[in-house]
Amino acid sequence: MVNESQLVGVIKQAKENDKDRKFTQSIEMIMVFRDVDVKKGFAINETVQLPKKTKPASVCIMASGDMGIKAKNAKADMVMNEDEVTKLSADKKKSKNLINKYDFFLADTKLMPTVGKKLGQLLGPRGKMPTPVPFNAPIESFLERFRASVKIRAKGSLSMSCRIGEENMDDADLAANANAVATAIEKTLPNGSKNVKKIMFKTTMGKAIKVEQVKK
């Protein structure tokens, strides 16, 4: 697989290849695969925790009682109790808007049956079924971990893309995040790095720059 010094160079080039914008652009990583059969169920559905701090992912927590209070105190982006989940499920448009708004969902294990019944048909296909949080588990730690994570999905496709940070981050930090993603994805592939055809990086509005050498 590639090493981080290679990644640093390509990430730097991707930044320099684009003109200045009036907003802070994300840095996106693209992986293209080979020798995998998308018709035989090949799919990727991974959550990868990034080692270097970036813009936090948005997290909605479905919990009541003590866990709900702790989630609010930890400043989760959204906290919903069981009644609110039930009420939301009655309006499909609002449900879809909320599901699209947040990157990750966590839920008290006691609420999982309700969440599955009321919102499962919308959450499941989007790869956003909540991660169960056991009673008395440190919800603050769960929240911190998912805020530092990215969701990676690929189904019926030979490629995937994800955000690894923002253009104002240090190139080495972006490379560390990219390496974490590549390592996690390789573990899901039948033949590891041999199934990686190419890796590319781009800014939000820029052109993709390819990592020239992928070691076998």
Image: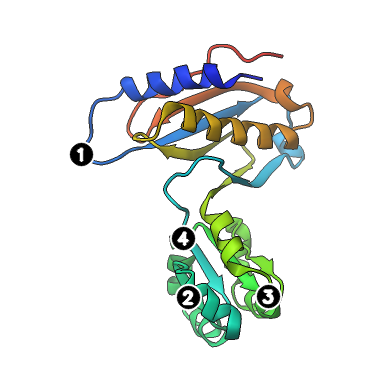
The quarter in which the C terminus is drawn is: top right
Q: Quadrant of residue 136?
A: bottom right
**Which of the marked residues, 2 or 1, is nearer the chain's N terminus?**
1
Callout 1–callout 3 Cβ contact below 8 Å: no
Q: CA distance from mark 2 to mark 1?
A: 33 Å
Residue at 33%, 38% in the rendered image: 25
According to the image, label 4 marks what residue? 100
Residue drawn at the location 55% of the way across and 62% of the way down: 143
Q: Choose mark 4 or mark 1, whichever is in front.
A: 1
Mark nearer the N terminus (4 vs 2): 2
Q: Amino acid at mark 4?
A: Asn
Residue behind mark 3: 112
| Residue 51, position as x, y percentages in the image | 56, 41
Mark in front: 3 vs 2: 2
Pointer 1: residues within 10 angstroms few (<14), some, or many (20+)? few
Q: Amino acid at mark 1?
A: Lys
**Residue located beneath label 1 in the image:** 22
Instruction: Answer with mark 4 or mark 3, whichever residue precedes in sequence.
Output: 4
Q: Is the residue marked by circle 3 packed among few (<14), some (14-19), or many (20+) residues within 10 Å?
A: many
Identify the residue at image location x=46%, y=60%: 100
Q: How many marks?
A: 4
